[in-house]
Every structure is written in structure tokens, then in C-alpha cells.
Image: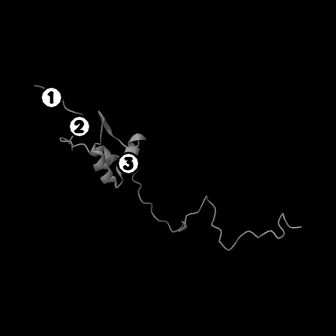
């Protein structure tokens, strides 16, 4: 009897079992509904096996790592408060002057 081996990377002799939606939702800290939305939008790697959805734990960890954003070193020259649309913030006490007389004044 001959066996065929699945494509496994070197050093990874045994694959961990595939995960279901509940396990993925727990790992991500979200509800099942959100995982299903990620699948529908094809934003998460998944395996469609008949009517079942399964997730490879190695691919899931890679996907999580690819979304990771490293912290940026804090520079003293950068402002502590981010600027909005590249402009500076306007203090709240500087308001537009009201128009005396307005359009209805006669």
C-alpha cells in the first residue's frame, strides 16, 4: 500500500488538526459572525471542505502576524497630539464672530 504525503514544509512532520469557526473566533477574541464575515470577504485564509469551513492553525498564525504593526519609536520632535488633516488644532475659544443684523434684520 502506498501513501501520498500532503505538502508539508520541512521540519513540520505532523500538522496540527484544523480549527473550526468557534476555535478561530476564540483565538481572535471575536464572535463567530465576524469570522464568517472575514471568510465571505476572503480576508482570512480558510479551507472549504464540502459545507464545512476549517482553518489551518499555521496559516492563521501567519495571517495574524502579517496584520501586526510594530510599535514606532517615539521621537521628541514629533508632537504628542496628532494633527488633523495636516493642520494645527484651533483652540475652542476662537470662534467665528456672529453676524450682527443677519439676513432678516431690517
Q: Earlier in the sequence, mark 3 or mark 2?
A: 2
Quickly name the residue at label 1: 3
Q: Secondary structure at mark 2?
A: loop
Task: Using the image as rendered, state which of residue 54 and residue 11 is in the foreground.
Answer: 54
- As drawn, 65 above or below 75: above
Identify the image quadrant of the C terminus: bottom right
Identify the residue shown where x is 18% and y is 29%.
4
Q: Residues within 10 Å of mark 2 (few under 14, many from 20)?
A: few
Q: Residue at x 33, y 47 (%)?
A: 62
Please name which of the two marks, 3 or 1, marks the residue nearer to the observer: 3
Residue drawn at (41%, 40%), measured in percent from left and top? 40
Count neighbours of disc 1 (C-alpha within 10 A) and say few if under 14, some if 14 to 19, many if 20 or more: few
- Residues at marks 1 and 2 touching, judged by CB atoms closer than 8 Å: no
Tag 1 secondary structure: loop
Please provide percent x and percent y for residue 70: 41, 57
Nearer the camera: disc 3 or disc 2:
3
Quarter of the view holding residue 51: top left
Q: Are marks 3 and 1 in contact (CB under 8 Å)?
A: no
Q: CA distance from mark 3 to mark 1?
A: 38 Å
Q: Secondary structure at mark 3?
A: helix
Q: CA distance from mark 1 to mark 2?
A: 14 Å
Q: Which of pointers 3 and 1 lies earlier in the amino acid sequence?
A: 1
Rounded to the nearest whole Å, what is the CA distance between mark 3 and mark 2?
31 Å
Q: Horizontally, is 2 left or right of 10 in the view?
A: left
Q: How many marks?
A: 3
Q: Give left or right: position of 49 versus 93.
A: left
The residue lying furthest to the bottom in this view is 93
First-in-chain label (1 vs 2)? 1
Judging by the rendered image, the residue that carries numbered circle 3 is: 33
Which residue in the structure is indicated by mark 2?
8
Q: Nearer the viewer, mark 1 or mark 2?
A: 1
Amino acid at each position: 500500500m502506498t501513501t501520498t504525503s500532503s505538502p508539508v514544509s520541512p521540519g513540520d512532520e505532523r500538522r496540527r488538526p484544523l480549527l473550526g469557526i468557534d476555535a478561530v473566533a476564540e483565538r481572535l477574541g471575536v464572535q463567530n459572525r465576524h469570522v464568517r464575515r472575514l471568510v465571505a470577504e476572503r480576508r482570512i485564509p480558510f479551507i472549504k471542505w464540502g459545507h464545512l469551513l476549517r482553518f489551518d492553525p499555521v496559516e492563521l498564525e501567519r495571517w495574524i502576524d502579517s496584520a501586526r504593526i510594530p510599535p514606532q519609536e517615539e521621537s521628541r520632535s514629533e508632537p504628542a497630539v496628532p494633527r488633523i488633516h495636516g493642520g494645527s488644532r484651533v483652540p475652542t475659544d476662537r470662534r467665528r464672530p456672529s453676524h450682527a443684523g443677519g439676513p432678516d434684520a431690517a
